[in-house]
Image: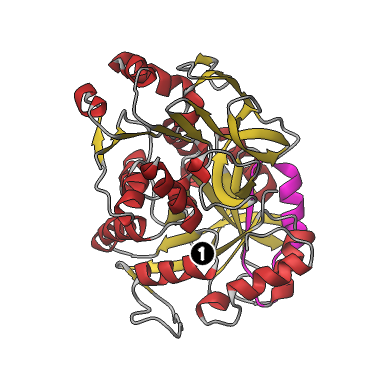
Amino acid sequence: MKLVIIDYGAGNIKSIQFAFKRLGIDAILSNDPEVILSAERVIFPGVGEASSAMKMLEKSGLDKLIAELKQPVLGICLGMQLMCNSSEEGNTNGLGIFDVDVKRFSNAVKVPHMGWNTVNGLKSNLFKNIKEDAFMYLVHSFYAEMCQEAIASTYYELEYASALLKDNFYGVQFHPEKSGEIGEQLLKNFLEL
Amino acid sequence: MLTKRIIPCLDIKNGRTVKGVNFVDLRDAGDPVELAKQYAKLGADELVFLDISATLEGRKTMHDMVLKVAEHVNIPFTVGGGISSIQDVDDLLHCGADKISINSSAVKRPDLVNELSNKFGSQCVVVAIDAKQIGDEWIVHLAGGTIPTKLNLFDWAKEVEQRGAGEILFTSMNNDGTKAGFANDALAKLSESVNIPIIASGGAGTVQHFVDTFKVGKADAALAASVFHFGEIEILDLKKELKENSIEVRL
């Protein structure tokens, strides 16, 4: 299985690479369009700030490339948020793959939302063999609103979309690479889609 | 619902765990990777590695350790100790650390908190604060509680929050090592003063202490070392007890 993790200079991608290594897959880190296009599976990671990450993508032309990919793509954390229409973080446009906007939690709760929380209303084979109310690890200050494309939700201040699906594009707000055995199951499911 | 976190802390010197770690099933209790794997299996929610190496060479072995932990452990971990520059943090994050913790370097140069959160995001910047209650005041201390500063705990916490810290690890020097419970009054006040998560540290001795620090101290996470390392408290038993006390945990 040729799996490429898009390396556009955003955050800690070593953890994702290691998580796949534990599943027996040697992931390739690349920002080369040809390498990304030829992958069977693509991971779109991201940690950091939305508007600057978006600028890095635009500068390299990866924004257009990602939106046109045909193979299963999994956006993780900020990666997922950048696949949405827009984000309040730095008031930036996103790739517009998911028809939903990304907002900030209010100060009625502690921000960032940090730690283990449950995922509910699970749809799609991405959650195969994962039970309702399974725990995932999350660290984020911005969230995607509940929408048609939600395939999982999580409650913190309000119910928000913690996983999204449209066509071949998957997005998860949580960090499967840091979510113990359940997270590993999800990564395995992604490989088997 | 977001759960309360239980965090074992491992002291590392020259790439090895120090202080007695007394784990029954380990081949090598000095190996941080094995210990970390074991803790992940036993239900720890996160791990903290504190580098107490005194030499530059000792520090360098930390990178290899972080790389190995990231390779083998599937829960988040924080690395602290001797971090004073953007480069230090960049190196550790590249090795696979999820968060870094800074303490005295933030006191010496507060702008470091801004620089790190701007470059790497607040989510990976933990500011550790050691404080001691002197009279009615909580005073921030450096070097393991030996050097007092002019900073007040609550003011300093608010400042680092404004500068972009994503989390505060508060150790009460009055409670640390006593096994007599966490500094819950100060923790509760801290939790009300800032709007970022607080990790309680210092004083864990019994299961009830953890119940109290979540209920009375309003902590978001609790950190401890020896009670876990010596098997005095099993993490799974602890979490079951917390659950029975209506505290949400990941089981």
Q: Quadrant of the C terminus of chain B?
A: bottom right
User: Is residue B11 positioned above or below A130 on the image?
Assistant: below
Check disc 1 and report its element: helix, strand or loop.
Answer: loop
Answer left or right for A18 relative to A116: left
Residue drawn at the location 41% of the way across and 42% of the way down? A190
Residue drawn at the location 63% of the way across and 48% of the way down? A118
User: Is residue A62 positioned above or below B42 on the image?
Assistant: above
User: Is residue A130 positioned above or below B182 on the image?
Assistant: above
Q: Quadrant of residue A16?
A: top left
Please, which chain is the residue tagged with disc 1 on? B
Q: Is residue A94 magenta?
A: no
Reading the image, the residue beneath label 1 is B144
Q: Can you give x and y, in whole percent of width and height, for residue A46 in the image?
A: 42, 33
Q: Specify the segment rendered in magenta.
A: B180-205
Q: Is residue B54 visible?
A: yes
Residue drawn at the location 52% of the way across and 45% of the way down? A127
Q: Can you give x and y, in whole percent of width and height, for residue B192 in the image?
A: 76, 45
Residue type, numbered disc 1? Gly
